Every structure is written in C-alpha cells, then in structure tokens.
Amino acid sequence: MATARLLVERGSLRDRSEDWGDHDFLALPSPGDRVAVGRGNEVHYLTVLCVHHQIVPTGGGAEPGAQVVAKWTGSG
C-alpha cells in the first residue's frame, strides 16, 4: 500500500492544481494510468500525468512521500 497526495488539473495546465488530499493506492500509478476517485457523491475519472517522489535518507527516521498529478477527464 502506498499513500500519496493527489493533485488534480481541471483546467489548462497553467491553472493551479486542486489538492484532493492523501489517498491510498495499492501501488503508485504510472503516467498514463487511469484512476477512479470517489469525491462527494460522484466518481471522478483521472489520467495520471506524473508522480513526484519525495525520497529521504535511509535511517533518518523521516517518512518518504509522493504526489500524484492527474488530469480530470470526467465524472459519472
């Protein structure tokens, strides 16, 4: 299981990303993967653009992290 912050692009790439919070993934997705996210009373469909890995030194006690950046492609 991997936890990552989900940043969603809903307008043009020049617009600010929407922070949809932390989500658990079975494994971090790859660019081009499609994901479905429940938000409110709807399921939103996203296409992953990139994953930003936040690495930490071994044995330092800090937790690694990741941000998944995805383009909103619809809901239903």
Image (cartoon, helix red, strand yellow):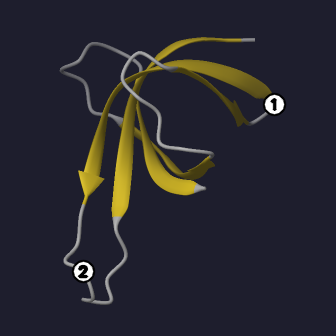
Identify the amino acid type marked 1: Asn
Crowding around mark 2 (Cα neighbors within 10 Å: few <14, some 14 to 19, many 20+) is: few
Label 2, label 1: how far apart the Cα atoms are: 41 Å
Identify the amino acid type marked 2: Thr
Q: Using the rendered view, name the quadrant where residue 36 is placed.
A: top right
Q: Position of residue 10 (x, y in %)?
A: 41, 19
Q: Which residue is mark 2?
A: 58
Q: Using the rendered view, name the quadrant where residue 43 is placed.
A: top right
Of callouts 2 and 1, which one flags the residue occurring earlier in the amino acid sequence? 1
Picture layout, residue 1 above or below residue 46: below
Crowding around mark 1 (Cα neighbors within 10 Å: few <14, some 14 to 19, many 20+) is: few
Picture layout, residue 2 above or below residue 6: below
Q: Position of residue 24 (x, y in %)?
A: 61, 52
Q: Position of residue 25 (x, y in %)?
A: 59, 46
**Disc 2 to disc 1: CB gap under 8 Å:** no
Q: Position of residue 68 (x, y in %)?
A: 39, 39
Residue ID at (31%, 83%): 62
Residue ID at (47%, 33%): 29
Q: Using the rendered view, name the quadrant where residue 76 is placed.
A: top right
| Outermost residue toward the front in this view | 58
Residue ID at (62%, 45%): 26
Question: Which quarter of the rendered picture does the N terminus lie within?
Answer: bottom right
Q: Which residue is mark 1?
A: 41
Q: Is residue 58 left or right of residue 45?
A: left
Q: Is residue 26 left or right of residue 47?
A: right
